[in-house]
Image (spheres, grey):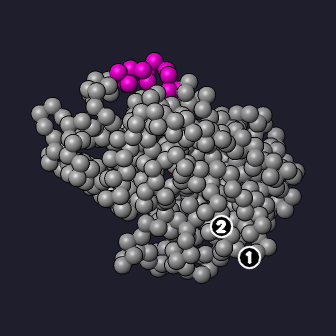
Amino acid sequence: MASQVLVAANRGPLSYDLRDDGTLSARRGGGGLVSGLSAALARQPGALWICAALSDADREAVRRDVSEPGVRMLDIDPTMYHDAYNGIANSVLWFTHHHLYDVPREPVFDAEFRRRWASYVAYNEAFARALAEEAGPGARVLVQDYHLALVPGQLRELRPDLRIAHFTHTPWAARVFLDMLPDDIHSRLMWGMLGADVVGFHTRAWADAFAAAAQPDDARRVAVFPLGVDGDELRALAHRPEVDEKLAELRAEVAGRRTIARVDRTELSKNILRGLLAYRELLTVHPEWRGRVVHLASAYPSRQDLKVYRDYTAAVSELAAQINAEFGTQDWQPVLVSVKDDFARSLAVYRMADVALVNPVRDGMNLVAKEIPVVSEAGCAVVLSTGAGAYEQLREDALTVNPYDVSATAEALHAALSMPDEERAERTKRLAAAATALPPTAWFEAQLAALA
Ligand SMILES: O=P(O)(O)OC[C@H]1O[C@@H](O)[C@H](O)[C@@H](O)[C@@H]1O
């Protein structure tokens, strides 16, 4: 049956595992984009989510025609998928929008790049064709993120009757980085996204950067939808028994000391190394904190298919080990790194942290900065990068820092640790209110309404 509301995103709401006995089991897909969209789509009867098969088990599920209602997985040739996802989306596009290039060496746009780009075009076409097949007359289609930047333009050609929105969950690159792209690639990306009736971003800053690269007429379609947190849902999740258990364990480990927490994928843009350097500087410049604070750094591996991510992950654990060797004592380990993606443990960390360190060089939004104040028990001072999308909404009550300025970050950590309890609690309350202003369901419905 044709759908009236469709979502297209690389990652789907579920993925499959192939058991030893050859049967398939479904589990919920991971990440902020997925959890936000899943909640919103659950409220749209008859909606369809089109996503890519991400693994051999997913592809097997497509071949066996195992399907869940409301989800269509696309079986894309694995080599083509790898070139599109790792070779273009997570390398060129992610690096451009987050300004991550090591400029003397990168980027390089050569014949190999062109080959991968052809895969990216074909992978986008697979989504556009599937959407064209599944959408009812005049249906509304919400296309997600940089993986699928060409889809709106391609779909518009196949189905001029549809109402299409594109939403970017990352920042939009500054001109100097966009200008590195070959001209035809840059204009193709703009063409793709401007195939949409509404082009959405998390912040005014990213929307303005995109609009500056578009024609004045097209810029009118750009809109801002700052994704927030569902406070009631998150608080309920944070008070499940398994989270209580993790909290008790963590409290025992920390033994009454103050805590500085971070929770991230081990992602270049999250600036974990400078965060550790700032913590080291804090312990050097303000030795009164030695033995009295613990840095709980959750940094779980991500995108390990890319060498630069493997190297970065190794550098993070090496620097943490150095800090522990330099300052640690018999009964105090200054940094506790956790590399397991353990949501229950993260929620326990959120509940107990005195200080949150959210220092990405650039970030589309950063929901950690919004989630921590919502579940914090006694109040949490948020040290927040000016490069995070969340900065636009949280700047008043966070302690904001230039993410490259390690010394300023160290001083902000000191100020956060020294903040009077009452002030911390007051700021946390206001941060939580700002964080819950546009929960996922309202965020999604606002975009649907913009297409009406
Ligand atoms: O490649 P993955 O693991 O699906 O992660 C992609 C997502 O990663 C998130 O960190 C970004 O905020 C999203 O913009 C992006 O879609």
Frontmost residue, 161 versus 226 = 226
Dot 2 lies on which element? helix
Q: Where, by quadrant of the figure, is residue 156 drawn?
A: bottom right
Frontmost residue, 31 versus 399 = 399
Report the side of 258 relative to 288 (left or right): right
Ligand 1 closer than 8 Å to label 1 CB: no
Q: Which residue is rendered at x = 36% and y = 62% of the image?
A: 405
- Residue under numbered circle 2: 208
Up/down of 69 relative to 413, above or below: above
Q: Residue 215: which numbered mark, if any? A: 1
Residue 135 screen position, x and y as percent = 80, 49
Q: Which residue is rendered at x = 55% and y = 35% of the image?
A: 429
Q: Are marks 1 and 2 in contact (CB under 8 Å)?
A: no
Report the side of 341 relative to 313 (left or right): right
Q: Earlier in the sequence, mark 1 or mark 2?
A: 2
Query: Where the N terminus falls, by quadrant?
Result: top right
Q: Is residue 218 magenta?
A: no
Residue 343 screen position, x and y as percent = 45, 33
Count residues near mark 1 (Cα–Cα under 10 Å), then give few for <14, some for 14-19, many for 20+.
few
Frontmost residue, 41 versus 122 = 41
Residue 289 screen position, x and y as percent = 24, 41
